[in-house]
Each structure stands twice: as C-alpha cells, then as structure tokens.
C-alpha cells in the first residue's frame, strides 16, 4: 500500500504514514510522492494526495471540506514544491 511501481529513474520525493483520523484499527496507510521521467522528455509527478491544491491557496469565499484529518489550509512546503515543479517544467522547455 503506497509503495511506488518499479520505474527506471523514479525518485521518491516524500513518504510517510497516514491515518484516517478516526482512530479505528487498520486506518493507517502509507503515502509516497514521486517523480519519474516520461517517454518524451517529460516527467510525471504524483503528489500522493487529492488534497494538493488545498495547500496552495485559499481564495476568498472558499469553504474547505471537512474530511479525514481536515486539510489544514495553505502550506508553504506545498507552495515551494509546486514552484520547484513549475521551474523544472520551464527549464525543461528551454532545452533542445
């Protein structure tokens, strides 16, 4: 559960334990965020979460959903990782 596929060039960016937040037995999981090269000089980023965008911003009027362990809002780490990815995309586009 949460372990990445064996893909040549795959890099693990982050990993750790997760919980459902309910305290139920068996509610723990494991996440692994990865990046790996694609077939045409591109790359694939897997954030290991569907809540990535909640860490980026909090526009006026946005109502944060209450699920699991309640996403906590804007996270500078998520913003920095996203900026690094966008910089990598821009840098990759300038090559060749």
Image (spheres, helix red, strand yellow):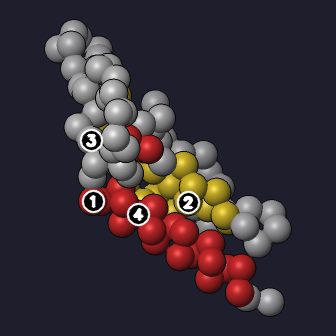
User: Which residue lies under the disc numbered 1?
Assistant: 76
Q: Residue 13, which numbered label?
A: none
Instruction: Using the numbered discs, state the Cα–Cα distance from disc 1 to disc 3 in whole angstroms.
Output: 10 Å
Residue that protrudes farthest toward the front in the picture: 60
- What is the secondary structure assignment of the residue under circle 4? helix
Query: Which dot, 4 or 2, sits closer to the camera?
Result: 4
- Identify the image quadrant of the C terminus: bottom right
Residue that protrudes farthest toward the bottom in the picture: 96
Q: How many numbered circles does the render carry? A: 4
Instruction: Using the numbered discs, state the Cα–Cα distance from disc 2 to disc 1 in whole angstroms.
Output: 20 Å
Residue at horizontal 28 percent and vertical 48 percent from the top: 74
Looking at marks 3 and 2 on the same chain, the residue that comes earlier in the sequence is marked by 2
Marks 1,3: beta carbons within 8 A: no
Instruction: Using the numbered discs, state the Cα–Cα distance from disc 3 to disc 2 in whole angstroms.
Output: 24 Å
User: Looking at the image, is 22 positioned above or below residue 73?
Assistant: above
Instruction: Using the numbered discs, state the Cα–Cα distance from disc 4 to disc 2 in whole angstroms.
Output: 12 Å
Marks 4,2: beta carbons within 8 A: no
Q: Would residue 16 be seen by someone viewing this image from the given angle? A: no
User: Which residue lies under the disc numbered 3?
Assistant: 73
Query: Which dot, 3 or 2, sits closer to the camera?
Result: 3
């Amino acid at each position: 559960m949460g372990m990445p596929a064996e893909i040549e060039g795959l890099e693990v960016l982050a990993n750790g334990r997760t919980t459902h937040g309910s305290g139920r037995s068996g509610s723990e999981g494991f996440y692994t965020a990865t990046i790996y090269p694609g077939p045409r000089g591109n790359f694939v980023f897997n954030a290991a979460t569907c809540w990535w965008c909640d860490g980026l911003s909090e526009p006026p009027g946005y109502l944060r959903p209450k699920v699991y362990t309640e996403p906590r809002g804007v996270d500078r780490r998520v913003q920095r990782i996203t900026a690094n990815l966008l910089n990598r995309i821009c840098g990759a586009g300038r090559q060749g």
